Image: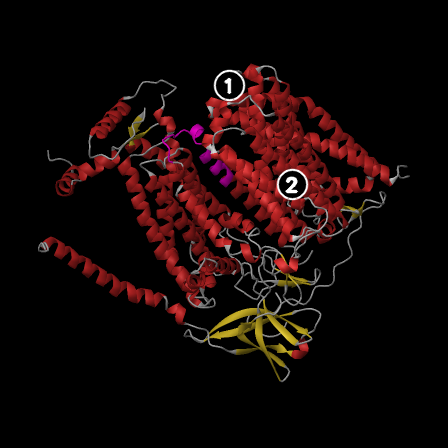
Amino acid sequence: MEPTAVSEGMRRLTMGLLMLSHIQLAAFIIGALTIGVGAEFLGLILSRFRARLDRLAYGVAFFAVLVYSTGAVLAIMFVWLIAELWPPFWFTVMRINLWPMALEGITFALTIAFLFPYWYLWRHLGKLKGVHLALGVAAVAVVHLQQAMIDVMAGYMLTPTPPENLLRVFLNPTAIPLDVHRTVGNISFAGFVIGAYAAIRTLRARDPDKRAFYDWLGGFALVIGLGFLFLQPAVGLFYLEEIRWHSPGAFNSMMRGPHSKAFLGQSFLLSLIFFLALLYLAKQTKGLKHPGAAWLRILLVVNALGGLLLIQPYVIGPSQYTLWVRWVNPIGSMQPYKYLALAAQSLTTIAAVLIYLGGRLRALRLERIGQANRGAQAALIALGVLASLMMLLMGYIRESARQPFLIWEQVRIDNPQLFPTRPPPRPPRSEPPPGPGDGAAR
Amino acid sequence: MAPRLSKRAFGWLDRRFGLGAVLDRLLNDPVPERGGWWYTFGAALFVLFLLQALTGLFLLFYYEPTIERARESVLYIQQEALLGWAVRGFHYWNMVLLVALVGIHLLRTFVSAAYKAPRELTWVLGVLLLLLMVATAYTGVILRWDQAAYFDLVVGLRITELTPVVGPWLAELWRGGEVINPHSLLRTFAFHIFLFPLTLLAVALVHIGLVVLLGQYGSWINYEPDPSGAPLTEEQAASRRKLEEELLDPKSRKVNLPARTTFFWPFHVFKEGVVTFGFFLLDLLLVLWFAAPIEGPVDPATTEYAPASIWFFLFFDQALLLFAGTWLVPAANVVPLLMVLTLALWPWLDSGSEVRPSGRLASLAFMLALIGVIFTFSFMAASRIYNFEFINHP
Amino acid sequence: MKPVRRRTLLQAAIAAIAGLVTLLVGGPLLAFFADAWRRRQPRQWVKVCDLAELNSIEPTHFRVVFKLDHLQGGLEEVRGVYAILTDKGPLVFSNVCTHMHCSVRWLAWRQQITCPCHGGFYDRWGQLIGGPPPFSLPVYEMQVREGEVFIANAYVARNYL
């Protein structure tokens, strides 16, 4: 049969556009649903804030139901098109991942089965908050499970395992770390986007009650976004370790090769995110009579200095040999002082969040809820855009790390009709080590 | 007709030792009623611990704590001795259950705010019990002296060595020398069968004594009006009267009056019995279904074996990936110590009088973060270790 | 000065007796336990292999056995070592990872010495390349005697990390 008459550039462009837009919606739905149902649960415990938290959950559920079909359609188009454009690859990966994909299909159905009643039966269930919450928790659980199954397949593409062993396919080295990384990332991303939406609504609200709600929501969503963002370095390290071990070529290409420049882009976005988040916190507490407010300003200055160091595209300052005893740097051209700058930005942001959440300052801030600072809202909107850009860049990094393969070392992207070939045989095993008591040479 | 023998025996003891008063204080103690099933884990822990000590004693009749014979004696127990697989299996699976139960009990106590004044010391002793339980389990695994046990010991010694200032000396004390030698196993053996369990028992008795002295707390649910609105039964009313009297007595240390109480014996003891029995049954099922593990003989010069830490340390094993480089490796000892210290000193970090979770957001967040990290890291470690098995021959 | 009360005197005496007993019992017990600090493994030289078995391309793995004569019973301690030829002669280094002391192994397909515990990796001469470990693999004191490689149970400092 003739291959589809579409150029390679067009294939990759189509795939890229479909995938990136799908991820924006799907990642947001997963993250936002988790935040929303979590808020509803919190509302049950914290009766003081129940009204606000329920309103957040309601809004999230509404949006999820609104865009769910769009996200799903993009995914289905993706599935259909990739079968047209890279048939042997798709056939291979779907055949090997039969059970993960079967489970994914079931969870897809279950998500719909739980999500839509969660939204539509909200009023009907009325007093039965427990049942409603159970529906929400079930929806969140199955949507996470759905993502987990997709991550099994995505992990397989990067770190393939012998397909005969089903357990090894499910537990392929990057499946779980990718899923954890994505889950944390989704919640963080959703936090920032919800914050941006809240900022827009705050600026446009005329009704003081509405403005108070959206002002509160902006801060709440930002803290969630930042909080989960802080977890990413550790979780990302675990993911990177697995790639380094099981697909070292991909690791090298991503961290040391030409694609490593993309990480400089990520650190640039991260630097902006930290700065703008701190700016929001500082502006929102402007004028409050509390030493914490002054501290936030000091931290903002330190943060800005760190950011200026971090975003430089060229290298100035002491080199690794004069500053460190040992030079181990697998990450592109991040000179040591850039790590320090990043650390300074992270630490100042963490400290700022803790100060902002501290009892007295928070109480003062909550007293004047609704008098939102306009500059702060602008920062929040920018944060949403930046988080979105980070997701797009992350998607690009992910795909380019695996180039030129679709399944690492087995199926290439540039020849769509090639069926998979196994990698060349490894060098023969050396002799087995001596038994105990031998004491001599091997 | 003379009174029954049991009554006469009881009377004899009562006249000499005041047994009646002691039993009355212990058995007829008024305890909170609502949520009673959640307050049974401590009792289950104690009973299962006694069973653990019992099976451990019987294992002592066959185990040889020497480097040459340790693993073989364990194999003898597992394969040759009559029902040895059952005794050893029970000792192993009970260990798993005990460590899990400690976590569950800690979680319940934490959520109920049962560490608030005047129960701070009970909580601190509880954290100490957690450490002792984990230490006992860990040293017990080393006694197998198979590959897994050997590397568990190696890593434990290394982490001890990383203690600031005194690390190398402490490690040498445990190791019994500069390098691992027969004394290492013997010292670990002494810790496992004597030092840790007896300390655990002593601390547990003080811990239980404090609970009895200060009165069982329950949780905030017990101090709010009962939504069911059901009237008190006769026994509940009697126990409440007893508690009210005790609260008026200036000598009593109790401070809380739940809305609904019941007598410890037999109402609460029944719940404790059911839960303990349930865990015991789970133990038996695990013993019947899965054999206790034993791996190959110790070979420090191995190039094939990929060590995996014990299940309850998996999360720490994953975190060790983060303790990298000259600066951070020494922190591998300090950071866990700080976290345990934070946990132990939590009553002073959250010292307000607010007991409902809604007023203790920081506590909730701390515990959720802790559980989240432990579970996520454990799964990631399991996946990483599972896949590293194949790294030699990709 | 008020005369010392009999009660105070007796309390002090009890404290003194208790302290004395604690010292008399605890002291020797602690010393007994800390005997470990006195015991040093005697310095010994052990043959690793013949010089002809080594090459300069890949490290070769050997088991060496040291004696623990300082503990009675003629016991032995097994260690794994890697040996490779360099332009300065044979280099023999330990197989104990400097992170958490797991046993490392040479992976020919990666051309690296790797640690299975947390993924630390070293080059063929045991020098640290990356991962969690803080230092390179320790190098043994080595002597070549008549075409045979011997090592002592002591390390030398690397002049490169």
Q: Which residue is mark 1?
A: A128
Q: What secondary structure is the magenta-colored segment mainly?
A: helix
Local packing at callout 2 (Cα closer than 10 Å; few below 14, some 14-19, many 20+) is many
What separation in Å lies between label 1 and label 2 (alpha carbons)?
45 Å
Quadrant where the image shows the N terminus of chain B: top left
Residue B267 visible: yes
Q: B216 or C142: nearer the eye?
A: C142
For this view, does B374 lie left or right of residue A328?
A: left
* Badge 1 or badge 2: first in the primary sequence: 1
Please provide the residue range marked out in magenta. Answer: B351-370
Q: B357 or C159: nearer the eye?
A: C159
Write down the quadrant of residue C110 in the picture.
Answer: bottom right
Mark 1 or 2, closer to the camera:
2
For this view, does A402 lie left or right of residue B256?
A: right
User: Farthest bottom residue?
Assistant: C146
Q: Which residue is mark 2?
A: A271
Callout 2 secondary element: helix
Callout 1 secondary element: loop
Q: Is residue C153 magenta?
A: no
Q: Is residue B357 magenta?
A: yes
Image position, residue A69 (x, y; %) = 71, 24
Image position, residue A82 (x, y; %) = 80, 36
Residue B65 visible: no
Q: Cβ–Cβ below 8 Å for labels 1 and 2?
A: no
Mark 2 belongs to chain: A
Image point 63% across, 21% down: which residue? A203
Image position, residue A357 (x, y; %) = 50, 33
For this view, does B393 lie left or right of residue C1?
A: right
Image point 15% across, 59% down: which residue? C13
Write down the quadrant of residue B215 in the picture.
Answer: top left
Number of numbered labels in the structure image: 2
Check disc 2 and give the amino acid type: Ser
